[in-house]
Amino acid sequence: MPGKIIQSLQRVGACNPVLMIDEIDKMGANPITGDLASAMLEVLDPEQNISFVDHYLNLSFDLCRVLFVATANTLYDIPEPLRDRMEVIAIPGYTEEEKLEISRQHLIPKLMKQHGLDDQPLDITDATVMRIIREYTREPGLRNFNRRLETVIRKVAVMRATDEPVPAHIEPDKIPDYLGPPTFIPTTEDRSPEIGVVNGLGVTGSGGQLLMIEALRLPGNGQLIITGQLGDVMRESVLAAKSYIQSQAETLDILPEMFSKYNIHLHFPEGAIPKDGPSAGIAIATAITSLLSDRPVRPDIAMTGEITLRGRVLAVGGIKDKVLAAHRAGIKTGLVPKQNENDLMNIPETVRNTVRCVPVESIDEVLKESIVEVNMPKDLSIERIVQAERERASAQEKKPE
């Protein structure tokens, strides 16, 4: 709001405070506040804020001694000139072990006190907390996890207030009685290998996320159908992946006629969520290869990386968040670009011991790790189509003019 900076300085009574600007990526221009991005340039730039002028109060002030801390969910929504004047400190999501420790030391005691149970503490076992983390919350932060814990403790407080029998310990098998059916069911462990289904890794405003990619073929004339509300960058990754796979069809044991006799439909579930970025390049290439060669993909593997027309795997961002997302989803192996190998050092050791991170340089290494080599019969319908086309061409050649 207009005059907020000077009012904050007056309230704290100091000329060198720490001022936090929360969610700076949500600011925009409107008729009331004007262009906030331009105003923030004058506030945050140490070369300009010496002569900062609050036009609402018509007062000048030297802000060079003020330490500004801004928070944002995503950097892409912050204008580039403003982002250039900031020192970016990326804070990744919490691991399951960190959430367990935070709940034991802070969240559960605080909620017990808020609901009047501090005199008779409720014993929530670690196994119970881990089930809440894995099956009811899948986020990098603690907001929804705190809500789930609060729901359990609030229902216990109501039971005690109404003199209902309350168990001394809350075991994992009793959690559905308090929270209902699980929201997230681990599917990667029980799912069998499927053809054309690949686990990709991406980064959203709430942290890393597992993105499933599905590919399907149907009779047609070689069209490429893409659904799932994708941005321009991801659509270009789809075209690059298809072109590379088509150029290497014989090497990958794919009939060349597959690209002319069949349509390829690529779908990215959760179509209401916009998706963009180059991170899904190798996952798309793996899905197309699996689909056209009739070879399934391992369900316990996830991957991220950009693909070139020569089949090279290029570096992408957000490696730590993506590996943490794979860890939360129960993934056993993660494929990351070789150029991002140094980023693996920032991943907690407990996660590295659970998720095997494999650096890859080319799509051949990706397919070797992810594709299940099985001897499956080729699609007989394709062979019949090819044979019919050859017979027709032969008849055309023998036909007299």
Image (tube, rainbow, N blue to C red):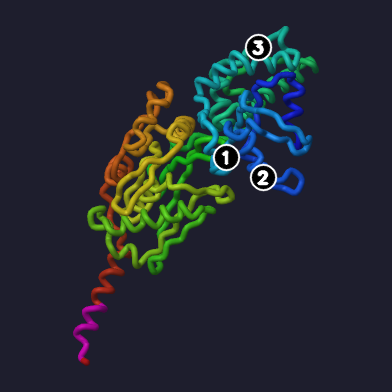
* C-alpha gap between disc 3 and disc 1: 54 Å
The part of the chain drawn in magenta is: 392-400
Helix, strand or loop at label 1? It is helix
Helix, strand or loop at label 2? It is loop
Identify the image quadrant of the N terminus: top right
Say which label, 2 or 3, has the lower sequence index.
2
Q: Residue 205: x, y in percent?
A: 56, 39
**Left or right position of 12 against 105:** right
| Residue at the disc numbered 2 | 28
236, above or below 150, in the image? below
- For badge 2, the amino acid type reads Gly
Q: Does the magenta portion include 395?
A: yes
Say which label, 2 or 1, has the lower sequence index.
2
- For badge 3, the amino acid type reads Ala
Of 257 and 24, which appears nearest the observer?
A: 24
Q: Residue 383: x, y in percent?
A: 28, 65
Answer few, some or many: residues within 10 Å of disc 3's Cα (few below 14, many 20 plus, some between 14 and 19). Answer: few
Q: Residue 36: x, y in percent?
A: 67, 42
